[in-house]
Amino acid sequence: MRGKKAFLLAAAGAALGAALFRLCCGQTPLQTALRRLSGLRIAAELYRQEKGSFPADYSAVLSGGKLEAVPTLKLKGRLSCSKVVNYPALKPGGTGCWGYVADPASPDFGTVFVDSAGKDPQGRHWTWF
């Protein structure tokens, strides 16, 4: 009976350890990119709520104190990138960085997106997020 109890305790400990690892460290690259994209969008929205409009350049979000630093984006087959590229419309330039629609005349003004014409690991275009 003692061996069975020890096995069950070890199995429970392993399951708990695996769950904790997934919580803190086990995100897939897709989940990490989407979480960071959400953070960039929230920072832009906080800026909009405070100033009344999205900025004409995403760097204003940083200088306005809504975001400490641009998070790193790492897409498969690309170098890591920690910058936001301003665009006049929601048309990815394929930099593999973050993109931002900076033209107030654009219907997508204020949109933050993954600047890639490629697809995510599940076959969806990055700009769909």
Image (spheres, rainbow, N blue to C red):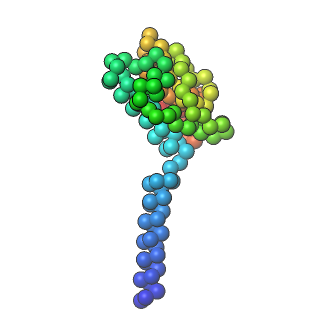
Q: Would residue 90 be visible to someone looking at this image?
A: no
Q: Quadrant of residue 20?
A: bottom left
Image: 75 above or below 57: below
Q: Quadrant of residue 106?
A: top left
Figure label count = 0
Residue reaching furthest top?
Answer: 105
Q: Would residue 54 be visible to someone looking at this image?
A: yes
Q: Position of residue 27 (x, y in %)?
A: 50, 50
Left or right side of 80 for 26 = left
Determine the residue positioned at 43% across, 13% down.
104
For the residue pair 73 and 92, the one nearer the viewer reads as 73
For the residue pair 92 and 72, the one nearer the viewer reads as 72
Determine the residue positioned at 56% across, 29% down.
83
Image: 30 above or below 101: below
Image: 1 above or below 117: below
Q: Position of residue 94 (x, y in %)?
A: 62, 26
Left or right side of 108 for 122 = right
Determine the residue positioned at 43% across, 21% down.
110
For the residue pair 1 and 19, the one nearer the viewer reads as 19
